[in-house]
Amino acid sequence: MDQQKGDLGGFFESLLRKQSVKDLELEGKRVLLKVTLKIKDTIEALESKRKHENRILKEKKKKNCEKQKKKRLYRKSF
């Protein structure tokens, strides 16, 4: 059961990052998943959402910086 919880965590993580989520196939039948996420109207929930969004933005910014550095190094090599 703990493994399933971990899998769901990754599933929701993908949804929050707006990445594609693979459809599930059971016994040769395709199952399409549609999920609607709602956040509680509590201060803790909203704060948690804000922290999560900020972490994702920092990761994206870090990746973009690394890409820019690689581009600059590539250009300097010529």
Image: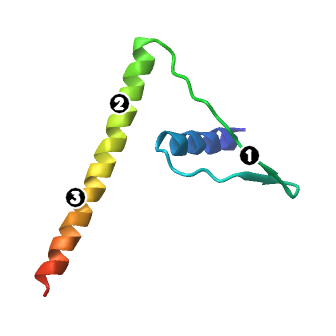
Nearer the viewer's eye, disc 3 or disc 1? 1
Q: Position of residue 77 (x, y in %)?
A: 14, 85
Image vertical order of residue 5 relative to residue 65, above or below: above
Q: Is residue 13 left or right of 28 when viewed as pictured?
A: left
* Residue identifier under label 1: 32
Give the residue number, with chain letter if any, for mark 3.
Answer: 65
Pointer 2: residues within 10 angstroms few (<14), some, or many (20+)? few
Gap between marks 3 and 2 measured at Cα = 21 Å
Considering every residue shown, the one lying at the far top of the view is: 42
Earlier sequence position, callout 1 versus callout 2: 1
Tell which circle, 3 or 1, labels the residue nearer the N-terminal end: 1
Q: Position of residue 78 (x, y in %)?
A: 13, 87
Q: State the residue at coordinates (40%, 13%).
A: 43
Mark 3: amino acid: Cys
In this rendering, the answer to whether 21 lies above or below 73 is above
Residue beneath disc 2: 51
For the residues carrying marks 3 and 2, which lies nearer the camera in this image?
3
Identify whether 26 is placed above or below 12. Answer: below
Residue 29: percent from left, percent from top? 85, 54
Q: Is residue 50 above or below residue 4?
A: above
Left or right side of 10 for 17: left
Going by the numbered disc 2, the residue's amino acid type is Lys
Of the residues shown, which amino acid type is indicated by label 1? Leu
Q: CA distance from mark 1 to mark 2?
A: 30 Å
